[in-house]
Image (cartoon, rainbow, N blue to C red):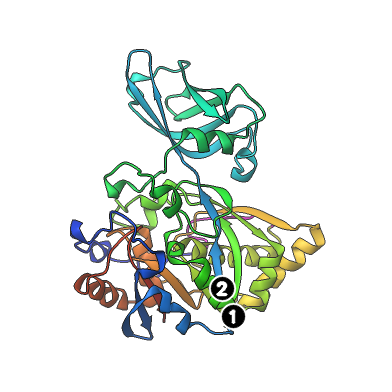
Amino acid sequence: MSIPKPPDLSVFNYHLPDEKIAKHPLANRDDAKLLYYHKGDIQDRIFKESTEFLNDQTTLFFNNTKVIPARLHFQKDTGAHIEIFLLKPVSPTSIISTIMESSGPVIWECMVGNLKRWKEGTVLSRALNAHQQEIMLTATLVSREKRTVSLSWDNENFSFAEVVEMAGQVPLPPYLNRDAEPEDKPRYQTVYSKEEGAVAAPTAGLHFTDEILEELKKKGVRESFLTLHVSAGTFQPIKVDDAREHPMHSEQIEVTIDTIQDLVNAQRVVAVGTTSMRSLESLYWFGVRLARGNEEFSIEKLELYQDGELPNRGAAFSNIYDWMKAKGLERLSGSTEIFIMPGYQFRVCDGLFTNFHQPGSTLMLLVAAFIGKDWQKVYNHGLENGYRFLSYGDSSLLLP
């Protein structure tokens, strides 16, 4: 198993002027510009016009993860400020959807600001005001090496999700170089967000409004939802010469049997965002695993680069559907660290809604894998025609 030819990573480090980065969201989500790419041709449109390019043969797949206020701030008695950035749960479970419902102590792997000022075993605390009740939230550094932190609170009537909502701040991307503001709480969230657990937004979905979703339904465009809890690793640039050696972050996927049925029946699959695309392609490879007698849903970084006879899209998802039915499963949970780069043959996705990504990122390689060398044409056009880049930036619809 090997990638035919590792890409030249220097090509993807395009120059992105700071003024091209959208530091704040637009007043209206669907006023964003839309770069429509179809088989090499480019049109400049507005996002609310995206419905023109979708028909009743299309199923849109959305990532309905919900961003949690993952930045928690504490102050030591000495006055030193400690910031805890939640990355992934460790105990009592590593399953995000379960730990968010916990009413008892939890342990998370975290990034810790000012870690050198916080000794292992030292307890930090802060009071929270919950419906005219005071809750005391405490944080204890469990392991400096593993960067694990225990969090507990003195009222079991509140879930961890509720406590974080009271205590935390919106985890804006680091490249925005600003503190979260009141507008970020609703705007760094899709209108269809539901399953709490992401520490970064699936930003391609930020442009959709309830009105657009309703118009798509009237046109007969189908919609289906899956969950991939986006991790902070999505911002990690590639720092190695050989892309195959880049340490990909593992992210949790949850999907219902109804979504698998939608995939079995889908004629034209359009992923809303790179997280949805990575999830869909990962699910295909789980279908391949099942055909080979492997029931573990944990897709490895380079597992997708395989030769030999492979099932088509419908057959792979039928494998999953039949397996879930036989097991009596309504919901499937797994993980993926799938790394899509040039050389990958897409098995599921026919189209992609996505924003404009950071230079030298894994997401740039994914776009290049999907539309080939035309990614340079798309990005040059965006830079030369006033498009806003990154999380709060403008959108593109790519149909190769």
Residue at point 57% right, 39% down? 161
- Magenta-highlighted residues: 295-303
Task: Using the rendered image of the protein, determine whether residue 341 is visible from the camera's viewpoint.
Answer: no
Q: Position of residue 323 (x, y in %)?
A: 75, 63
Q: Is residue 346 found left or right of 259 in the rendered image?
A: left
Question: Who is closer to the viewer here, 73 or 122?
Answer: 73
Element type at marker 1? helix
Q: Position of residue 143 (x, y in %)?
A: 47, 24
Q: Is residue 36 above or below residue 101?
A: below
Q: Is residue 297 above or below residue 28?
A: above
Q: Residues within 10 Å of mark 2 (few under 14, many from 20)?
A: few
Q: Is residue 4 found left or right of 99 in the rendered image?
A: left
Element type at marker 2? helix
Residue at point 81% right, 58% down? 328
Majority secondary structure in the magenta region? loop
Q: Which residue is mark 2?
A: 214
Q: Which residue is mark 1?
A: 218
- Residue type pointed to by label 1: Lys
- Residue occupying the far front of the picture: 132
Q: Indicate whether residue 278 is drawn in magenta.
A: no
Q: The C terminus appears in which quarter of the rendering? A: bottom left
The answer to whether the residue labelled 2 contacts the one labelled 1, judged by CB atoms less than 8 Å apart, is yes
